Image: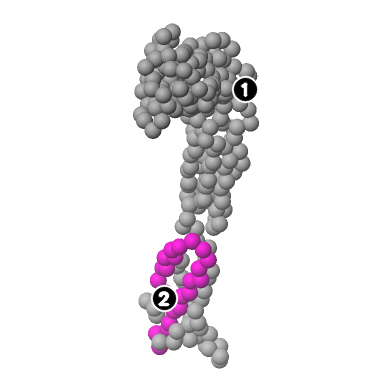
């Protein structure tokens, strides 16, 4: 808000005091809205109706919260290093009192969603907060077989490797589903595994002996559901 005050009565050319002011004519308090630069002017008149030249002032208004972006990688491998969120804050009006711009380290020591939240504050007190998330997952590699052909009734060894940046993990798990080309997935069956669960073969390797007994000839999709929430697919053909 901008308020005005009179500067007293005018002095006439002969040095005498001019007519008294009409205080009721003084421009009232002006409310300025909208961010940016604004010129506000006011006047006052004397009791004879003579109006002063405008008295003006330029004011800078900040009515807008800061701009803030927080960006995270969608995924990161377990125990990986150098994983950061990128933070950028700006304020084109009053400037920033709290500027979180830069990088923020994302912890990767445990599986699951990691959240980074940052707040920017400008010099008039407006705040903006933003968040982003990164899903920490196993390093999944060496899914086999891929596109191989098998005779119906022959067991198919399905395997994959789970690791982290330190090497391999032994606390993972997974289940296997199978779907004929264009069909819906259902739990796999095995003559050796317990249900549809993979077993650990050591050093991060997980295996499943898929039974193909009763499967018709054709192409099949195999879907691995890992305990970190990720899924991975491969294909086989029954001939």
Residue 119 lies, with reference to residue 196, above or below; the image says below
For the point 57% across and 46% down, which residue is it? 88
Secondary structure type for disc 2: loop
Residue 13: percent from left, percent from top = 56, 90
| Magenta-highlighted residues | 26-48
User: Earlier along the polypeptide chain: callout 2 or callout 1?
Assistant: 2
**Could you classify mark 2 by the number of other residues whose Cα lies within 10 Å: few (under 14), some (14-19), or many (20 or more)?**
some
| Residue 185 appears left or right of 85 | left
Residues 160 and 9: in front is 160
Residue 4: percent from left, percent from top = 46, 70
User: Which residue is situated farthest in the bottom direction here?
Assistant: 14
Q: Is 31 included in the stretch rendered in magenta?
A: yes
Residues 55 and 149: in front is 149
Residue 205 lies, with reference to residue 92, above or below; the image says above
Residue labelled with disc 2:
26
Residue 74: percent from left, percent from top = 52, 35
Residue labelled with disc 1:
165
Residues 207 and 57: in front is 207
| Residue 167 appears left or right of 198 | right
């Amino acid at each position: 808000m901008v308020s005005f005050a009179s500067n007293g009565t005018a002095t006439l050319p002969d040095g005498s005091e001019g007519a008294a002011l009409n205080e009721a004519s003084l421009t009232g308090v002006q409310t300025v809205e909208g961010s940016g630069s604004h010129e506000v002017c006011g006047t006052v008149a004397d009791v004879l109706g003579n109006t002063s030249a405008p008295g003006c002032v330029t004011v800078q208004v900040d009515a807008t919260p800061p701009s803030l972006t927080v960006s995270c990688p969608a995924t990161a491998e377990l125990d990986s290093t150098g994983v950061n969120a990128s933070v950028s804050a700006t304020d084109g009006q009053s400037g920033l009192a709290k500027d979180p711009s830069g990088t923020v380290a994302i912890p990767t020591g445990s599986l699951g969603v990691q959240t980074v939240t940052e707040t920017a504050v400008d010099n008039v007190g407006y705040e903006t907060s933003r968040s982003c998330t990164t899903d920490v997952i196993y390093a999944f590699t060496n899914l086999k077989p891929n596109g191989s052909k098998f005779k119906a009734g022959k067991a198919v060894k399905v395997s994959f490797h789970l690791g982290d940046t330190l090497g391999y993990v032994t606390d993972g798990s997974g289940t296997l589903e199978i779907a004929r080309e264009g069909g819906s997935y259902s739990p796999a069956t095995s003559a050796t595994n317990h249900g549809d669960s993979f077993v650990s073969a050591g050093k991060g390797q997980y295996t499943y002996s898929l039974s193909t007994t009763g499967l018709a000839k054709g192409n099949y999709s195999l879907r691995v559901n890992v305990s970190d929430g990720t899924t991975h697919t491969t294909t086989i053909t029954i001939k």
